Amino acid sequence: MLLLLLLLFKKILCHGPSTVVLYGPLPLFHTFLMVISLSATQVLGPHHPAAEEPLSFRMLQISSFANHSWAHTQGSGWLGELQTHRWDNALGTIRFLWPWSQGNFSKEELKHIQALLQLYFHSFPLEVQAFSSQFQFEYPFELQISFGCRMHSGKASGNFLNGAYQGSDFLSFQGNSWKPSPGAGSRAQNVCNELNHYRVIKEIVQSLLIDTCPRYLAGLRESGKSELERQVKPEAWVSKGSSPGPGRLLLVCHVSGFHPKHVWVMWMRGEQEQSGTQQGEVLPNADRTWYLRVTLNVAAEEAVGLTCRVKHSSLGGHDIIIHWDGYPILLICICLAVLVTLVILVVINSWFKKQSSNQNICPPHVSKPIFPTEANIQEPSNSGSFLCLAQKLWIKNRLQKK
Ligand SMILES: *[C@@H]1O[C@H](CO)[C@@H](O)[C@H](O)[C@H]1NC(C)=O
Ligand SMILES: *[C@@H]1O[C@H](CO)[C@@H](O)[C@H](O)[C@H]1NC(C)=O
């Protein structure tokens, strides 16, 4: 069976370009999920164009095995954090999720890759089921594979093929052979020993990792440039978190709605970064933007004067600065001012209403001056409002001054 598969793979590979992308033609085994942290660049300056940052293309496979006769596999392709491909199990085809998801590969090369994937996704579960007792896989189980490559500043900067069994690291492909993950035990060692017998498979995997994947990634980076470099400005706000203890405050700075993912957020006193600042994980919003929560645990009296500072490529050097105490006080002042003004207006208005109803609205003679000026209104009026009265007073004063 294994031999047959090898021959098939060889046949496909010999017919097409000698390279293939997407899941490696790894007939037996199982897999892994490696979370590739692209956020390792968290310390980079904020104004680097996205193209300068590390970028990866990876294929993820998740295969669930319920019992000896039931298995389900999901396959997907990811450019950095963005899903670009999906494997359609029903049709046995690659679904390109963006108009640019084909990168710069020709139709023909993509067809070969698709043919290889059809074979792979068909045989993978069968092989795993066939070897499950030899490898001591216990139903139900889940296998995950992450396979791909990275580039940095326009150059290929590494590749990876990792497998996980039941959610834990299981094995990887290093150099030109299969290696069990530390702590994965003798089961992983057995699987690797078995896999390492197949030289042709190792060569194919190597070629995919070293040649096909970097070329595909380079093409995708170009074709998907506008999406990758899409700039969306963050919004930021601060709030109080649940109290970390008596006399202490948890200051929370929320930053949301930004793209690309890389962002710098810090609690500051003036220009001084606060070393106790805790960064959360950058989480996805539903609209392909990102959210980050950054906290600082301080003594209550030390919160005054702290600011949350946000640097992001979309801000073009104009950092967002949110004052912990500043904005609330400003807001309180504005609210108070508005409130006081309203109260004064209401009082004045009702006072004038009272006056006018007593005196029949803009009365011909106002006995008492309303303003500290003389107020002898001559003509009658039916307008009746305090404005009317004030206007007449003003006109009268003007006339008298002349
Ligand atoms: C295998 O698992 C599937 C899905 O859970 C279930 O529907 C099916 O009945 C199971 N078959 C056997 C033989 O246990
Ligand atoms: C796609 O673009 C990359 C980088 O621009 C290049 O190395 C590669 O040769 C191009 N074409 C193919 C078919 O890989």
Image (cartoon, rainbow, N blue to C red):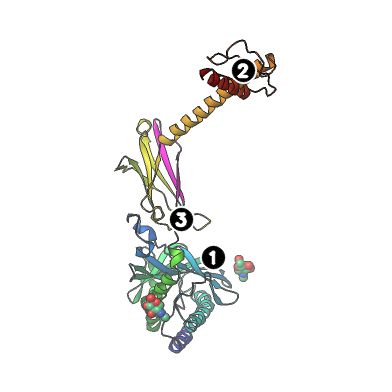
- Nearer to me, 287 or 336: 336
Queried on whether the Cβ of the residue with tag 1 lies below 8 angstroms from ligand 1, the answer reads yes
Decide if residue 285 is in sight here: yes
Q: Which residue is mark 1?
A: 140
In the rendered image, the vertical position of residue 215 relative to residue 334, given as above or below: below
Helix, strand or loop under label 1: loop
Say few, some or many: other residues with alpha carbon within 10 Å of mark 2 (under 14 / 14 to 19 / 20 or more): few
Residue 216, quarter of the rendered image: bottom left
Q: Position of residue 352 (x, y in %)?
A: 62, 19
Looking at the image, is mark 2 or mark 1 nearer the viewer?
2
Q: How much space separates mark 3 and mark 2, taking CA atoms? A: 53 Å
Q: Position of residue 181 (x, y in %)?
A: 37, 66
Q: What amino acid does circle 2 point to?
A: Trp
Decide if residue 31 is in sight here: no
Mark nearer the N terminus (2 vs 1): 1
Magenta stretch contains residue 241: yes
Q: Which mark is residue 125?
A: none
Seen from this angle, which residue lies furthest left? 272
Magenta stretch contains residue 350: no
* Residue for point 31% across, 43% down: 275
Looking at the image, is mark 1 or mark 3 nearer the viewer?
3
Q: Which residue is mark 2?
A: 351
* Range of magenta residues: 229-256
Say few, some or many: other residues with alpha carbon within 10 Å of mark 3 (under 14 / 14 to 19 / 20 or more): some
- Nearer to me, 163 or 65: 163
- Nearer to me, 290 or 367: 367
Q: Which residue is mark 3?
A: 232
Looking at the image, is mark 3 or mark 2 nearer the viewer?
2
